[in-house]
Each structure stands twice: as C-alpha cells, then as structure tokens.
Amino acid sequence: MSWEIVIGLEIHVQLATKSKLFSGAKVGFGAQANTQTTLVDLGMPGALPVFNEAALRMAVTFGTAIDAEVCKHSVFARKNYFYPDSPKGYQTSQMDHPIVGVGHLDIQLEDGSTKRIGVTRAHLEEDAGKSLHEDYDGMTGIDLNRSSTPLLEIVSEPDLSNAKEAVAYMRKMHAIVTTIGISDGNMAEGSMRCDANVSIRPKGQQTLGTRAELKNINSFKFIERAINVEVQRQIDIIEDGGKIVQETRLYDAEKNETRPMRSKEEANDYRYFPCPDLLPIEIDDAYIDAIRQSLPELPDQRSARFVSQLGLSSYDAGVLSASRALADYFEAVVAVCNDAKLSANWVTGELAKYLNQHNLEIDAAPVSALHLGQLIGRIQDDTISGKGAKTVFDELWNEAGEVDAIIAANGLKQVSDMGAIEAMVDDVIALSPKQVEQYVDAEVEKRGKMLGFFMGQVMKASKGSANPGQVNALLKVKLDALC
Amino acid sequence: MTNKTLVQISKDLTAGKYSSRELTQDIIADIKARDSIYNSFISVSEELALKQADAADARINAGSAELLTGIPFAHKDLFCTQGHATTAASKMLANFVPPYESTVGQRLLSAGAVCVGKTNMDEFAMGSSNENSYFGAVKNPWDLTAVPGGSSGGSAAAVAAGLVPAATGTDTGGSIRQPASFCNLTGIKPTYGRVSRFGIIAYASSLDQAGPMCKTAADAALMLNAMAGFDPQDSTSVQQETPDFTADLNRPLQGLKVGLPKEFFGPGLNPQVAQCIMTAVQQIEALGAQIIDISLPNLELSIPAYYVIAPSEASSNLSRFDGVRFGYRCDQPNDLMDLYCRTRAEGFGTEVKRRIMVGTYALSEGYYDAYYVKAQRIRRLIKDDFTRALSQVDVIMGPVAPTPAFDLGSNTKDPVAMYLEDIYTLSANMAGIPAMSTPAGFVNGRPVGLHIMGNYFAEAKLLNIAHQYQQVTDWHLQTPPSNGIPVSNQTKGAE
C-alpha cells in the first residue's frame, strides 16, 4: 500500500529579550543554576508577574513578517500541571486568544516549486526551568534560570507531506525569526526547537490517521531523521495489522528511534483559564502598523532581489536566502568580488560541501566572506585556475593564511604569458607526432575531444600553472593549422 | 493607651508623651500577657519591631516624622514580612520566612509604622469565622464564645481587644468587612487595584484586596493613605493618582443619595440586625442624606458564582505549595507523586482542600463552560447591577452580615451555611467596588456593622460618610468587656 504522510510542526522560538517574560531577571544561557531568577521566576508566595513589552513587540513583528492576523486583544491563560521545574504549578501561556492568528509561509521544494504552509497561530508563553538528573545521585536538581524565559510557539497546519518539507519549513522559520531579530535561532542552546505531529494515512484517504507527537527536536537533521523513523514505525505497525496510539514520543538521536514518553504526560487536563494576575493585552492598528513599517528585508524579498538585481536563478536565490547568516555571507562575498554568479556557485558549491562534511553552520565557517571574495577575485583576474582555486579554498578552510600568500606558497599562480604558453604548446606538438597524425586524420567533429590529450600534456608540463583557456585556444589554432 | 486611636497616638508621639519604643514595648508586653485569651496573634516580631520603633523615634526627634511614624500595627499573616515568619495560618507555611516584604508592608514601614506581629486568620484566607486556622480558632473579644469573623479574624480581634491600634486585613469575599462588623471596627475593602497585591499570599487573585482595620474612619483613612498606590510589580494595580483619603472626612452629607437594595433586607436577615441598620440609615438621613429604594436583582447569584470563581483561582494559586522549594514537605516521599500528594494532603487544612477540589473540578475539561464561564457571566451581571444602581445613588447601604457574630463551632459542620454568611459582602468583590463596615450597634452584646458600598475609587466618600456617622454616634468608641463576657441582653442597637 502506498502511504501519505501528514505532519504539523509546533516550533518554540526563544525570544531575544534582555529580561524574562514576566520578571526583570536576565535571560541567558549557561549561568550558574538559579542565579538568573527573581521571586516571580521562583514562584514565591505573593510574587506577581509583570509582562515584558519587548516580547509583545517581537511577537507582533513575527505576525507581520508572515503576514498573519495580529490580534488586538490577546489573553494570557494558565496551563495547570505539577512538575518540579514548573515552580508555580502552572505555565503562563495563551489559549483562546493568542497574539498571532492565521498566517502562512511559503517553502521551496527540492524540484524548485513553491508550497504554501498554513500557520494556525503563534502565542506567547513562558518556558519552564530544568530538572537536572545527572549530577545528583538519587535526587533531582532544579535550575530555574530558564523559568519564565519568553517563547513564541508557532503552530502550523498539518500541511507538510514529508520530512524534507518539515525541514524546509523549519529552516524558513529560522530564516525569518533571525532576519527580523526576534531570536538568535541557536538550536544547540534550545533557542529554537520543535514538536512534530506525525501521522500517516493510505493515499487518497481524507480523514487523518492517529498522530504521534515527537517532542523537543532541536536540530534540522534530527527533524528529518525523527520524522522518517517515526513514519516507518507507523507504517510497520499498520502493515502488521496494528493500530497507532495517540501519544507523546521522544526522539533518541543516538539510537535513531522514537519511544513513548512517561505516561504521566498523557492524562493531563491542563485546566486552562485566563490568568487573573495579568490584564488582557490590548493593542491598536497604529501599534501594529508601526511595527510592520519597520520590518527589515524578509527572506522572500531578499530572494526576489537576488534574482532581479544580481541575476541569480530563482533556485540559487532561494537557497542563498534560506538563512539570514547565509544570505549575509553571500552578499559579503559579492561585495568583495563583485561577481554574484560566481559567488553563488562557490557558496552553494564548495563552501556548502565543506560545511556539510564538517557538520557546521555558516556562522562557524572557517573561511571568511572576505577571503572567499578575494579567492573569487583571483579566478576572475586569471591569477589562478578553477582547479587551483579549490586548492586555495581547502587551505583557507584549514586557516592557512591569506589568499595571495597561499597561491604563492603552493605555486598556483597560473602562467598567462602568451610566449611561455606558446613555447610549451610547440614542445608538446613536436614531441607527439603520433597524436598529431591521428588528430589530422580524424573527422572534424571528433577533433575537439582529441584536444584533451594535448591539454593534459601542456598542463602537466606547466605543473598546472598554465591558463587552461589560453592553452586550449592556442592548441586549437596550431593543430588546425597542420590539417 | 492601646484603646487610643492612631490620630491620638500620633499626637502623643509628636508631643513626646512617650516614645515609639516605649509604646511598642508596652504593646508587645500586653499581647504576651493577654492574647492567650483571644489567640489573635500567630507570632510577635519583637526584635524587628523595636528596631523599627527606634528608627521611628529618630525620625520623630529629627522632625521628619509622618503621621504613622512610630505607630505600632499588626499584619494579617498573609502579608509577607521580610525576615519574619509568614504562615497564611497553614501548616504548609508554618516554617516559611520570606526574604521579601509585601508592597503594602514596605509602604507602611516607609511611613515609619512599626509592625509588632502577625495576626491569626482562616488558613489561606478561606473562611468566615477564623476557625480554619492551623494555629487554632480566634475568640471574639466582645464575647469569648463567639467567632470574630473571618478570614481577617485575628486582625479584628487584636484591634477590638486593644492589643494594637490598627491592623491590615485582606478581603476576597468580605474578609475585612465581616470581622470588622463582628468586632465593632471600621474596616474598608478598597477598589480592586487600589492597593498592591504584591507580596500578599494569593487566595483568589481577581477578588483579593487589602485594606485597613481600625477603630475609626479617620484612622482607616490614615492607614489607607499609606497602603494605597500604584505598584509596577502588580499588573492589576491601578495607575491612578492616590487621593488623600482624609481630605473629605469632614464634608457634610447634605444631598447624599443612599440606595437601600431590597435584596439586602430579605428573609435571611436577622430582624435585630435589620433594626440596627435601619436606625443607622435614619441617622444618616438626618444628616441630610436622601434614602432611595433600589434593587440589585442578581445579588443572590453572587454566592454560587463566587464559590466557583474563588476556588478556581485558588486551586491554581495554591499549586505552588508543592513541597519542592519551600514550606512543608512530607517525610520520606517514595517518589515525586507521593511527595506532591502527601505534602498537600498533610499540609493543607480541610477547608483549603475542599476549595482546591471544587476549583479543580470547575476548571476541568467538560465542566469549564458550565461552571467557570457561567460564573464569569454572572459576575458581569452583578457588576452591571452595581453600575446601574450607582448611576442613581452615590452609595449603597445595608448590613454586612445577616447575623451578629455566631457561636464558635456553630457553623463548622455545614460549609454551605458558612458560605451563606457572605451573602452581602461577596458582590462588592465580584464587582471590584470599594465597600466598608462601620460600627452601628449591638445585638445581645455582639456588634453589628453598617455596610457602605460606593463606586469605583470612591473610598474617600465612603470614609467621609462613616466619619460623619461616627461624629453623631458612639458605637465605635465602645470597648469590649475586659473579661470577654458580654453584659447579658445589653441590646443597645435595638433600643
């Protein structure tokens, strides 16, 4: 049987506010446990929350960026449950009246087409603290530094049809939230993570299958793997005649499997009700419009500009605008070498390949945009060949120094002196009478292919430094003259 | 000395008749000597109080004293006091010492007032008789066989017994006004948002409001001046300039329109209490007020609606008492669930558990619309009733409670009968309007309070009316019998 996959994502974005959602405590990663807390974050008796307006601005910025409905009236609600890292016994979130309503996001598929994914809503909520099980034998430590850190939870419609689409959606969200500056998007530190609701159904069936919710996935790679492994699990169960149980599951990256979370998570009735300690948030059109006016260039706009202004293909433009960091890097390279097409080729080609191999994000690339721009400049001015450039790139990756110094040290400067090249060409022709004879005897259309031998010989003689374009042109003239 | 009003003590301190330290020492000695009769205090903070008194004396000597500087008072044990135990009268918090001061407490300290201790109350402010305390019931100084009312019963008893000249209280459904009525005090619940809730342990956040409990309206105005004001730490605190609540005390009542809701004088009202109230109303009429019959048609719905909303909020507010970070923790928990269940089962008293259960039920999936949402709709109706009524009249008057203080133990078996005690007080909390109680007579030696309710932010008007009434009556000047045994059948109010 052929199966259709249905995926919806709930993305948690940690907002880059200075202080917490409901207290003046500093937001930060890695501080000593419980040092970034106030009475409010600790859930002390009598402590009251005060809403951080910076988080509101960020949420509204997001809403306008994805062209969603921004709700002028939104309400914080309490989600009640007991857990040691939830100090108040409830999480302050939004339920019936979220700050952002219906919107959408366009993602680019691998075949170059565009797919529109519905965004159901996005709401503000506070993060919980952390339970630390490792360092305390037989006990659990509680760190409330993260408690009340502001999150924007972005809920998609179940419009995603495979793991790759889910990743593309997540990447696009990442590009948007980092472009508009509401989050640092650091997935390793948990600044952006997602829950994936995954179900399958026979192709053509209208009703949705029973879904499993995969919790807290924190890398693009894991999203793809977790969804794929979960889909396969569901297919196996159904094809063996079993049934899918609606449950929350955890993706174990080491074992590459999903497994059910503790059952206590399942039977919760969260008893949502409006938080009586916080007033409803009321904003007006002027507030929303002012934020809309101040939006920076968004990924889609940037992509369109890459096509119209820089002449890139829409595919390259889409890839290069997929993250703010990547697009910034690309534009920095172009600024140095002034060749958008060649820059695009290098960034999406060699650089992307190396990043992939070393499992690095663009921010961590050891080759700076300046160096790559200079390298491309040396291709443009014929100082080095394309092949030589790859050698230089590899050296740059290993942080061997400046572009020109690497070219010199590796003898990669190509010979473009016509006299020197002509001498080498003449030598090769003189030393290869048999091949010359074959060339002359060959049909005209086959001669081009035979040129390769002579090219190879000249390049070998020049130790790779001859300008291949010049060699090729000269060989053709000289050999054709013999015919 | 301790039967003096704040105004008198303030004059004495300024005149150097005695120092704040001397007064504080006397008061603490008096509490130690006599409070075993009433059980109105949970703890006395002698060391802190003497430090505060010394600082106050320094201010008085330096000529920088305010009206409350050097004046001792007591806090209901729901107000967090920095460095001094704050229990909410619960086993759950019997060992809890807050590292912070409530905003109200801070404001009183800044004014130079001296906190001598923490008063008894119904556990987590849940109750109308002060019998729901982990630290035992409080006795009414007017009659030791009667309850002082609740939940601010300890504050009421302490002031009535002359142990302190003033105390703070909180009022979620009548918890300042009803004990003030039962103990012959002047107590005011301000407009919701007038006084910061920060640092006051929450019962029902949308209803809780703190206020003073004193002997006179003038004293209450003085206390409220210090307690009220916008607090950026409380989002429901109102960002509005705080008037001088003493400024209007002497305004004549000529032309005042007083509404008497017929629903306040229905069959449940004790006839002798009704007579006290009608006598008081006539006296106010004689001061120039016009009496107008009005109706608050949804009043009787306030009990069921309140007992959905308040427990719902409480069930969530009290979730933080889980034995993890502070307060009581059960011995040797087997696992996390055992820790939660036993800590809360052992740490909370019966009435608190009852309200947590009711609230949890009302918020549960499938019941939320039928209970919580419907109760909020009723709340809206009640609010609309008041808005309508207060567009016709300046203030509304009636009884605070259907009866005078009832006997200790008489209502403890039947929680619903106890809830009915709050029939006249709940609606002001539901609407968020200010309301107060002022002494208006006695029935069988037990005090009766006149209830005055007004429009939003009309505290000054309420205090003005009470003050004017107190100028022509002496109920508020009566002191309880020193042995706590009422002079039998001394029914002054029904004369």
Image (cartoon, rainbow, N blue to C red):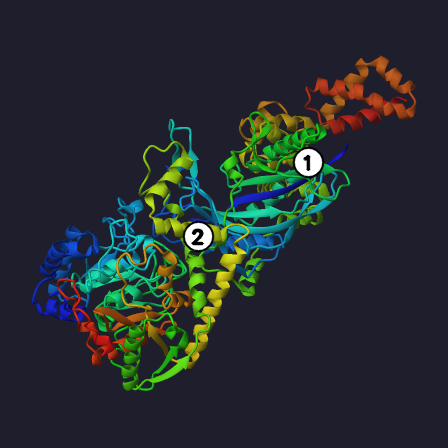
- Chain designation of label 1: A
- Residue A339 picture location, percent across and down: 67, 41
Question: Which residue is more in the foreground, A152 or B154?
Answer: B154
Q: Quadrant of residue A453?
A: top right
What's the amino acid at mark 1? Asn
- Residue A380 picture location, percent across and down: 67, 35
Residue A345 is labelled as 1
Question: Which residue is more in the foreground, B490 or A287?
Answer: B490
* Vertical relation: A237 (above or below) B468: above
User: Helix, strand, or loop for circle 2?
Assistant: helix
Report the quarter where the C terminus of chain B lies. bottom left
Give the residue pinned by disc 2. Answer: B358
**Nearest to viewer (mark 1 / mark 2):** 2
- Residue B10 picture location, percent across and down: 15, 68
Tell me, yes or no, if residue B169 can be seen here.
Answer: yes
User: Helix, strand, or loop for circle 1?
Assistant: helix
Q: In which quarter of the image is residue B246?
A: bottom left
What's the amino acid at mark 2? Val
